[in-house]
Image (tube, rainbow, N blue to C red):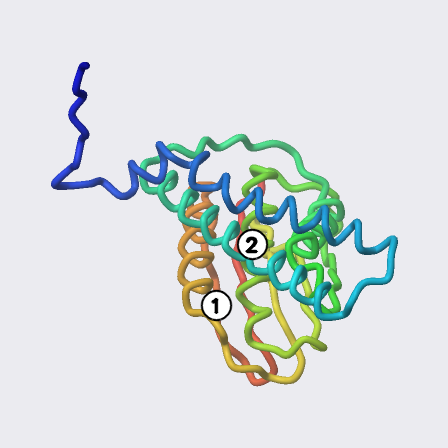
Amino acid sequence: MTNTPLELPAHLDLGQLIFDQAHDLRSPFNQVVGFSKVLLNDLSADPAPVARKEDLEAIYRNGQRALLLMNGLIDIARLDRREKELDPAEIEIRALLEQSLAYWRKFNPASKLRTAYRISTTASHLYADELWLRQILSGFIMVVAQYVDRHAEVTLSVEEEPGWFVLRVSSAGKKARPFSQLDVQMQGYAGRAMIELQGGEIRRAEEVDNGASIEFALPQH
């Protein structure tokens, strides 16, 4: 019999660990989300006890949240290690806003928040990394949505000023107590880093009387 020593490290680079083990860290949450979604879809064909459906919905929501938090940690590790690669291209503005809202709704299927977007520019396209930008907008929606109740509205807007496109993510409605500073910190850090890596800047991030607003600018090319 050959004995193989186990490595029990005295020191650990958390960022490196998260980066190296991203697949295994995500895997359990993906399975929780995937299987609970399958069960919910099966229930849609037959009447089921309300309590059973509510339990499955709770599993699904919490699985989604755990997956989003883990994705956030992985993104932060990659950003800190400069492992996320920029891939800029021409992006259709209207499609960007629609897809960002759809992406957020996908991960928040039970939300009653109304969503809208406004475009105040004659330009039809901007130049940036499309995947990063959708992720930034979806993350900022998560942040501002914390400050309002479930019947409020979240709006994305784009306007133009000399040399810049200015994007704003805002919520408006009845105020609610913020439920997670973790979301603000993680999404704020990752969003700011991805904006600055594209030559952009955060202009304003604030709680307002009826919600919250985050405004940032990306350079025109």
Residue at 75% x, 45% y: name it: 95
Residue 4 lies left or right of residue 29; in this view the side is left
Residue at 54% x, 62% y: name it: 215
Residue nearer the viewer, 29 or 12: 29
Instruction: Find out whether the residues at labels 1 and 2 contact each other: C-beta distance under 8 Å.
Output: no
Q: Which mark is residue 72?
A: none
Picture quadrant where residue 221 is located: top right
Nearest to viewer (mark 1 / mark 2): 2
Quarter the N terminus occupies = top left
User: Within 10 angstroms of label 2, few (less than 14), some, or many (20 or more) residues?
Assistant: many
Residue 211 lies left or right of residue 106; in this view the side is left
Residue 70 lies left or right of residue 59; in this view the side is left
Residue at 65% x, 34% y: name it: 90
Q: Position of residue 26 (x, y in %)?
A: 48, 41
- For marks 1 and 2 on the same chain, the one whose residue lies earlier in the sequence: 2
The amino acid type found where label 1 is placed reads: Ala
The amino acid type found where label 2 is placed reads: Gly
Q: Position of residue 194 (x, y in %)?
A: 46, 45
Q: Which mark is residue 63?
A: 2
Secondary structure type for disc 1: strand
Residue at 74% x, 44% y: name it: 124
Please indicate, yes or no, whether residue 221 appears anywhere in the rendered image: no
Q: Which residue is mark 1?
A: 205
Image mark count: 2
